[in-house]
Image: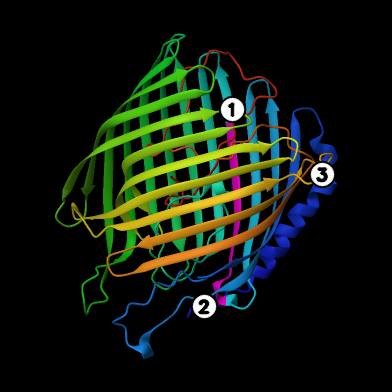
């Protein structure tokens, strides 16, 4: 039985409502030069056939021990604020979002999150650029998570049950352009995930990368060295008859060579090849060597975005408290269907094979299948900031001893005020090695006043 949500959730709801109401008070100030503020509200109703992601019952299970998946309807309420401040040499974004997933008959399965993200970019000289970011999240998550759009749903293996947690992270990036075609970039990041339990399985994750890039007319070559250190607290040993818990320290080092080629203005491909070394710094100091790879074909413009990608990489999963080797293939797309009817579509199809790395060896694989499709409609031409969405999601998580199948259908309304005229990416591009899609040396001395590059903060283990 999942414990009830703490009383502070009520306060969190009022905080979200108050934040949305603040739009009316500060919209005039947001209209000042370089500053803009937008309120976003999403309301949804839906139905799912497996609210707690309960595994399917095996035929050999005695009748008195069988637990069957339960169905229920639910509502989602998600207000938020986005504040942007731009100058010719800076771009800054502050984003707050409250999201609550509330079931009609099973309150023990409810989820909520408060998320605050700050992202900034500074042109520090004609040849250098600095970026800084902070993200903080507090809330309670069950296995039923609906806080990403259809084109951005991550493929992530999840445990059973619900967890209250606090999470925070910081990131930094710096680039130096030595010539019109050669540049060097470095990045650092640190994240803490702290579940609020009696024996918290905390995760501490630090990352760093150094890249050299060379650009030609239609090609970009890169050489990158990545490192990631992860410490897990209070990890169960998994041995029968014992409750012993221990800490686990793991290090991943990856060396990559990359090539990106543009086919005109919109089509491009990316190919990264290299090798990863996963080292278990606890116990026997075991090591595991694996190839690292990413192959992606992309089409990117304001109206249509699409990507087909395959990646082979190692990454931590904060929910399962483990380092895992991931093989992942995805297809994501967003496109208008009819300009006259104001219809569009967005969706993701993908499969992931997740193999935990323990003491330098690979454990039993978890295979996750995902289909997430949505039909979008702007009902009134004169109010384009109002959008209706009909969304279907299918998840199938197959492990050695269990299988979880879940289907859900959701109807949502999204309202943005004032309208946000900045182009937005509706799909999440694959980034297993911490790089950006278009890491080309800058050819301008400063960003334009209306140009923005918003960085999204995401908890480790939830994103791709």
Q: Looking at the image, which residue is at 56% across and 33% down?
A: 305
Residue 109, magenta (yes or no)? yes
- Residue contact at pointers 1 and 3, CB within 8 angstroms: no
- Local packing at callout 1 (Cα closer than 10 Å; few below 14, some 14-19, many 20+) is few
Which numbered dot is residue 3?
2
Answer whether residue 80 is magenta in the image.
no
**Main structural element of the magenta stretch: helix, strand or loop?**
strand
Q: CA distance from mark 2 to mark 1?
A: 46 Å
Check disc 1 and report the residue beneath it: 301
Query: Is disc 2 surrounded by few (<14), some (14 to 19) or many (20+) residues within 10 Å?
Result: few
Pointer 1 or 3: first along the chain: 1
Of pointers 2 and 1, the one earlier in the residue sequence: 2
- Is residue 213 shown above or below 412? above
**Residue 5 coordinates in the image, percent (x, y):** 58, 73
* Residue 314, disc: none
Residue extending furthest toward the bottom: 64
Q: Nearer the viewer, residue 158 or 116?
A: 158
Establish if 74 lies above or below 131. Answer: below
Q: Secondary structure at mark 3?
A: loop
Question: Which residue is painted at 38% across and 61% down in the image?
Answer: 397
Q: Which mark is residue 380?
A: 3
Left or right: 97 in relation to 184: right
Residue 66, percent across and down? 38, 84
| Residue 429 versus residue 370 in the image, above or below | above
Quadrant holding the C terminus: top left
Region in magenta: 108-120
| Residue 67 rendering spot, x and y as whole percentages | 42, 81
> Mark 2, mark 1: which one is toward the viewer?
1
* Residue 339 percent coordinates (x, y): 72, 35
Nearer-the-camera pick, 318 or 393:
393
């Amino acid at each position: 039985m999942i414990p009830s949500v703490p009383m502070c959730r009520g306060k969190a709801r009022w905080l979200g409502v108050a934040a949305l109401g603040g739009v009316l008070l500060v919209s005039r100030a947001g209209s000042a030069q370089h500053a803009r503020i937008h309120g976003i509200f999403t309301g949804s109703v839906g139905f799912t056939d497996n609210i707690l992601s309960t595994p399917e019952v095996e035929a050999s299970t005695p009748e008195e021990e069988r637990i069957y998946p339960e169905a229920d309807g639910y509502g989602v309420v998600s207000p938020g604020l986005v504040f942007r401040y731009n100058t010719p040499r800076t771009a800054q974004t502050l984003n707050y979002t409250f999201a609550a997933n509330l079931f009609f008959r099973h309150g023990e399965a409810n989820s909520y999150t408060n998320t605050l993200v700050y992202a900034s970019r500074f042109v520090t000289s004609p040849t250098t650029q600095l970026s800084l970011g902070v993200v903080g999240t507090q809330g309670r998550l069950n296995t039923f998570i609906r806080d990403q759009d259809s084109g951005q749903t991550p493929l992530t293996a999840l445990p059973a049950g619900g967890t209250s947690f606090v999470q925070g992270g910081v990131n930094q990036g710096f680039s130096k352009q030595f010539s019109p075609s050669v540049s060097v970039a470095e990045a650092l990041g640190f994240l803490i995930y702290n579940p609020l339990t009696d024996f918290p399985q905390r995760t501490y994750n630090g990352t760093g990368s150094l890249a050299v890039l060379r650009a030609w007319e239609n090609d970009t070559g890169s050489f990158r060295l990545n490192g990631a250190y992860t410490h897990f607290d209070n990890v169960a040993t998994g041995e029968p008859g014992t409750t012993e818990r221990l800490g686990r320290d793991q290090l991943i080092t990856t060396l990559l060579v990359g090539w990106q080629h543009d086919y005109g203005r919109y089509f491009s491909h990316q190919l990264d090849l290299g090798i990863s070394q996963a080292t278990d710094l606890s116990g026997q100091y075991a090591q595991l060597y694996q190839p690292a790879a990413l192959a992606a074909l992309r089409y990117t413009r304001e109206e249509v975005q699409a990507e087909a990608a395959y990646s082979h990489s190692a990454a931590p999963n904060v929910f399962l408290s483990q380092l895992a080797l991931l093989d992942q293939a995805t297809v994501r797309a967003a496109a208008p269907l009819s300009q006259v009817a104001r219809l569009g579509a967005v969706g993701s199809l993908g499969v992931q094979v997740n193999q935990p790395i323990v003491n330098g060896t690979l454990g039993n694989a978890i295979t996750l299948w995902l289909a997430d499709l949505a039909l979008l409609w702007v009902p009134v031409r004169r109010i384009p900031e109002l959008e209706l969405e009909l969304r279907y999601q299918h998840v199938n998580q197959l492990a050695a001893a269990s299988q979880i199948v879940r289907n859900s259908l959701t109807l949502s309304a999204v309202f943005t005020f004032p309208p946000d005229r900045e182009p937005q990416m509706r799909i999440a591009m694959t980034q297993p090695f911490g790089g950006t899609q278009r890491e080309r040396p800058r050819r301008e001395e400063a960003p334009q006043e209306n140009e923005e590059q918003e960085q999204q903060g995401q908890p480790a283990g939830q994103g791709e």
